[in-house]
Amino acid sequence: MEAKKENGGIIPGPTNPMVTPLLTDLYQFTMAYAYWKAGKHQERAVFDLYFRKNPFGGEYTVFAGLEEVIRFIANFRFTEEEIAFIRESLTDSCEDGFFDYLRGIDCSDVEVYAIPEGTVVFPKIPLLRIEGPIAIVQLLETPFVNLINYASLVSTNAARHRNVAGKSKTLLEFGLRRAQGPDGGIGASKYCYIGGFDATSNVAAGKLFGIPLRGTHSHAFVSSYMSLDEIIDKSLRRKDGSITCEDFISLVQTWLSKIQWSNSLRDIFGETNQSELAAFISYALAFPNNFLALVDTYDVMRSGVPNFCAVALALNDLGYKAGGIRLDSGDLAYLSCEARKFFCAIEKEFGVPEFGKMAITASNDLNEETIDALNKHGHEIDAFGIGTYLVTCYAQAALGVVFKLVEINNQPRIKLSEDVSKVSIPCKKRCYRLYGKEGYPLVDIMTGENEPSPKVGERILCRHPFQESKRAYVVPQRVEELLRCYWSGISDKARENLPPLKAIREGCIKQLELMRPDHMRRLNPTPYKVSVSAKLYDFIHFLWLNEAPVGELQ
Amino acid sequence: MEAKKENGGIIPGPTNPMVTPLLTDLYQFTMAYAYWKAGKHQERAVFDLYFRKNPFGGEYTVFAGLEEVIRFIANFRFTEEEIAFIRESLTDSCEDGFFDYLRGIDCSDVEVYAIPEGTVVFPKIPLLRIEGPIAIVQLLETPFVNLINYASLVSTNAARHRNVAGKSKTLLEFGLRRAQGPDGGIGASKYCYIGGFDATSNVAAGKLFGIPLRGTHSHAFVSSYMSLDEIIDKSLRRKDGSITCEDFISLVQTWLSKIQWSNSLRDIFGETNQSELAAFISYALAFPNNFLALVDTYDVMRSGVPNFCAVALALNDLGYKAGGIRLDSGDLAYLSCEARKFFCAIEKEFGVPEFGKMAITASNDLNEETIDALNKHGHEIDAFGIGTYLVTCYAQAALGVVFKLVEINNQPRIKLSEDVSKVSIPCKKRCYRLYGKEGYPLVDIMTGENEPSPKVGERILCRHPFQESKRAYVVPQRVEELLRCYWSGISDKARENLPPLKAIREGCIKQLELMRPDHMRRLNPTPYKVSVSAKLYDFIHFLWLNEAPVGELQ
């Protein structure tokens, strides 16, 4: 099979070249061999990929990772080297025919139906429905779950951070150094962008995905300077090119003493740290159009902010507009308010328009809780740089995505468990989202494949899949089929294109805004309802009774 | 520069080809440009990479990730495409000369001293000391921290799981599907192996690193069978090849009814699940030498275990030895004990030697706490398969590795903070581990670079770096220098080879066993002491006073 065409081109392989058909659990190969040995490998199976519980104590999840999954199956083929390794790894003397079989397989006979990437999703509803020869579909289980688990988790985490920060704030993902490995970092940048972040510090992710990049300088940059004497070339040309200021340092120093002796600011600080000032001047000379300063290396209000303002005012004289400050320690609520007051005083004292609106970025171990606390205390922060807690999903480091057999050879299969939440919903299914009068999604419903679809304006009974008494009639104002064909193998079935990242992100943001607010709140959110049709309900319970052993009390 | 030779060969690039010089934060490039613009980029800087707090509430950490770091710098060079992207990303009009500079750089002028990979390490002691031109060393910060952070965290987590499970148990890493992205999974397999795991399910990691692979089958495999009629080829040849049993199914069924009507087992179960039996027989026919069965799809004691035993006894008749069972749900302590009793009863009733010792593997959301609880309850589990909690380091998803400037142009630098634990220890340093009479490590000590090294049998004063009253004399019985040269650029300095993974693992296990047990226990472990020499202590505090602003109470 040729890799499937996408917008007239070949679908490229996974972003990480380490994602190969060997990126799976050994038991997928032992099972494939057992299926093959039993002549069962071609049996047509349907698996659902879904999760059982929303992460982070919330009531919603953002689905992500689909594009990587499709790239993976579009290029799924074993190399000779890989086959040799599998042969080595299957300790028993497996028959040669099996390796010939592996040599020939690809995903041309597999179909993948999926919810579009970036959709807000809920437990139990299949995110993907995968159909194909059982031996092949089993081999896909581990990489599919791996590619979707973290992607959906971190997108959801990003969406939750956006939710608490509010629409007007800039959110920057700064997590690369603390991520779980290199592509933990690259994945985080991509999926946080989908979940509503504005930019990343990760240059590789910027290049791979076109995500906007942001960054200033570190404490080490400030500490690397010892005095103003280190700056050799002190000249800076006006932004309009008209003249050159030959001694930018003197200009800054003049401003610093003006600030120091001004009426409104004189009591705030005395001598500022000169090595910090040297670092700021040096950075401004390198980036006069984009001067941003980390102001907490020595003392925010007694050194960092006055030093920054002196440089910013000197830049202003030459027609440049400074970008703002970053706070990376201390009481961010208090310091941001103090810095804002300082900026406003400068605006007033020296008549520099807009200086009071100087951007304040905060970083330092931020997460949902700390942003929420900042909001409650009141702060003047415009942008949050978030790392560790965001990208490692510290509050819950994994999503429990599972991959369950729901049908084989047209026979529905159910996986029972003493824990009802772990019982799988059998059958090849269709899934719909039903919208109410006010435009909010009301309920998701799963039906058997051949049931008629819910219709706008027609009453339909939605049942809880396992609790008999929980059911409700719904008259949908809009019906959206959730599962769409994203991979149809070599068949002629029309399939969805993979949208560009920006479109996924926009779709996701729109979807999040469409949700009823009580599902989205941080404290005690209302669960969104997930249901099955009356017919599917009856069938689940018929199958359940059939399969469950009858206990004996002894 | 040619990539440095390693054992006569070139050092290969990082395992993950996505680890390129662009895998860094944008601000490393903005700082590099500012350094270059100020003519400061060649200044010789020394940075320490270290962490501030042991993870998981423990008092030790396993250092890992060094090989990937060395592979990265050995191949550190920008491609034209990368340079073009950096140019695009630096919004200001940066001068062309900078990009010519980037074009020419590599790590031939960088030196890396490191503690050997797999060593047990402690807070504040540099894991790496990196020296080189400041602009280049800054570019290395993010990838170094990324490569070491998760590696050390997950190795430590593995070591902790080993510690609670005990030496005699087999530990299997089953985390690929729940890891944070594809190389989160691959990295987990590698670093859990270093920390003392025995094998992984991850085939790609097996191929890349030679880690032993393990796996059985899943619930889906069991559910995919509906009846014994599905098995077409029922024959199995004796292990010695002498005869062929034409109807292995009948042989199994005979054994099942023998078990069912045996004196000691007759009350335990009635009819077992026939689709499960079909799946087990099918798997045994495929892997007669390695028959392992997942026994909890329907009911462990009423179906799974009896079905397994019938198949195992039939295999035994033909000269094969079954591998054991896996439990993936329910009360693992209770079920493992019941299964063990069942196996022992079979051994006795049917005179099958060793049957009572059949291996029992347990999986299902295991972690340090659950293994500890199992130990307390009593269990019969031989092997633990651990996934989510291990590989995502659920209990603490990140290690706070930092990278701090300690010297520039031979001038020591200190990073102050209102939080004493965040104050950095200045100077280019040497680090030693001092061992006591009983062979245990007693204390790690940092000294200035030119101080004489501690000597065996000679009393030395070890001081807490920040608390004046905490100090102790030590007479070491053995002195181990911790930091060794792993990368010396183009200089002729001898440097350590990168040991093979197995050697790192063995070294790590030996080191863990060498530690005094009170540092290693789960509850209230004793902190291991980390100190500085008297001379370094004085210098730190001289520098501190010099740099800190004098406050003013208002």
Image (cartoon, coloured by chain):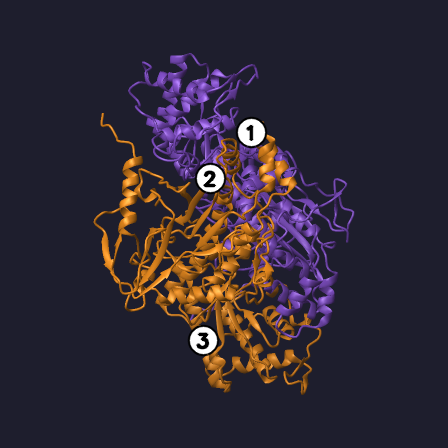
Chain colours: A orange, B purple
Q: Nearer the viewer, residue A60 or A112?
A: A112
Question: Is A373 above or below relative to B318?
Answer: below
Foreground mark, 1 or 3?
3
Relative horizontal placement of residue B280, taking residue B22 as reference (left or right): left
Left or right: A65, with B28 as reference point: left
Residue drawn at (46%, 67%), measured in percent from left and top?
A: A506
Residue A146 placement, left or right of A450: right
| SS label for mark 2 | loop
> What whole-number distance in Å separates the C-alpha atoms at marks 1 and 3?
60 Å
Image-based side of B74 in relation to B286, left or right: right
Residue A166 appears in which quarter of the rendering? bottom left
* Residue occupying the point 59% across, 62% down: A8
Q: Nearer the viewer, residue B172 or A420?
A: A420
Give a yes or no on whether discs 1 and 2 share a subunit. no
Question: Is residue A160 in view?
Answer: yes
Tell me the tag on residue B438: 1
Image quadrant of residue A367?
bottom left
Residue at the spot of label 2: A43
In the image, farthest residue toward the left: A469
Measure how far apart labels 2 and 3 are at the Cα level: 67 Å
Label placed on residue A427? none
Q: Which residue is mark 3?
A: A340
Q: Secondary structure at mark 3?
A: helix
The disc labelled 3 sits on which kind of residue? Arg
Q: Position of residue B373 (x, y in %)?
A: 37, 34
Q: Evaluate whether label 2 is on the same chain as label 3.
A: yes
Task: Measuring from the top left, give residue B402's x and y in whole percent.
Answer: 56, 54
Q: CA distance from mark 1 to mark 2?
A: 64 Å
